[in-house]
Amino acid sequence: MSKSIFYHAGCPVCISAEHDVIDLIGRENVEIVNIGVVKDKISEAEIAGVKSVPALVTPNGNVLHINFGASISDVKG
Amino acid sequence: MSKSIFYHAGCPVCISAEHDVIDLIGRENVEIVNIGVVKDKISEAEIAGVKSVPALVTPNGNVLHINFGASISDVKG
């Protein structure tokens, strides 16, 4: 896996961080996943270690929780 | 200002995030500042909006707090 994955849930904090991440690492280097919409990706995010969104999972599998928009349990609703 | 600034304080969470940030955006695109050592940069970080370390201040001035190593007040000691 060579791309990072940016998990978010559409919250204002998420959208702001998404823009920053794209500016910093380039749109072609990151897959954007909105787990508020694509609910079946929530478990994938959890397995990757995502505790809150927005979060960036790096190509080597580290999770960078960026600021704080919502916890995964909040996204589950 | 075209570089991002990565503020940290030498904590394990900071070092891990530093490696990830360098891998993601490139060493030449980020200035690394250890405010645990260079104490007179703490006020600069605070003015930029840094509340905790590690944090990345983007070229456009947004602050991305990445995971959580220590609050600024902890770094002040």
Image: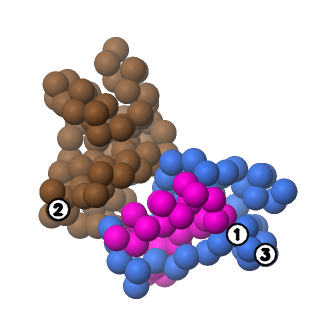
Chain colours: A brown, B blue
Q: Is residue A67 visible?
A: yes
Horizontal relation, residue A35 to residue B7: left or right: left
Closer-to-camera residue (A67/A63): A63
What's the chain of the residue with tag 2? A
Instruction: Return the residue at label 3.
Output: B40
Q: Position of residue A11 (x, y in %)?
A: 37, 35
Q: Label 3, label 1: how many angstroms apart (C-alpha)?
A: 8 Å
Q: Nearer the viewer, mark 2 or mark 3?
A: 2
Q: Quadrant of the C terminus of chain A?
A: top left
Q: Nearer the viewer, mark 3 or mark 1?
A: 1
The residue carrying pointer 1 sits among few (fewer than 14), some (14 to 19) or many (20 or more) residues within 10 Å by Cα, namely many
The residue carrying pointer 2 sits among few (fewer than 14), some (14 to 19) or many (20 or more) residues within 10 Å by Cα, namely few
Give the residue furthest to the top. A77
Horizontal relation, residue A75 to residue A36: left or right: right
Instruction: Return the residue at label 1.
Output: B35
Q: Label 2, label 3: how many angstroms apart (C-alpha)?
A: 38 Å
Give the residue furthest to the bottom. B28
In the image, are marks 2 and 3 on the same chain? no
| Tag 3: amino acid | Asp
Secondary structure beneath dot 2 equals loop
Q: Which residues are magenta?
A: B1-23
Q: Are the residues flagged by discs 3 and 1 in contact, CB closer than 8 Å?
A: no
Residue under the point 74% across and 76% down = B38
Residue under the point 61% across and 51% down = B69
Secondary structure beneath dot 3 equals helix
Instruction: Return the residue at label 2.
Output: A2
Q: Label 1, label 2: how many angstroms apart (C-alpha)?
A: 32 Å
Residue under the point 48% across and 66% down = B18
| Tag 1: amino acid | Ile
| Tag 2: amino acid | Ser
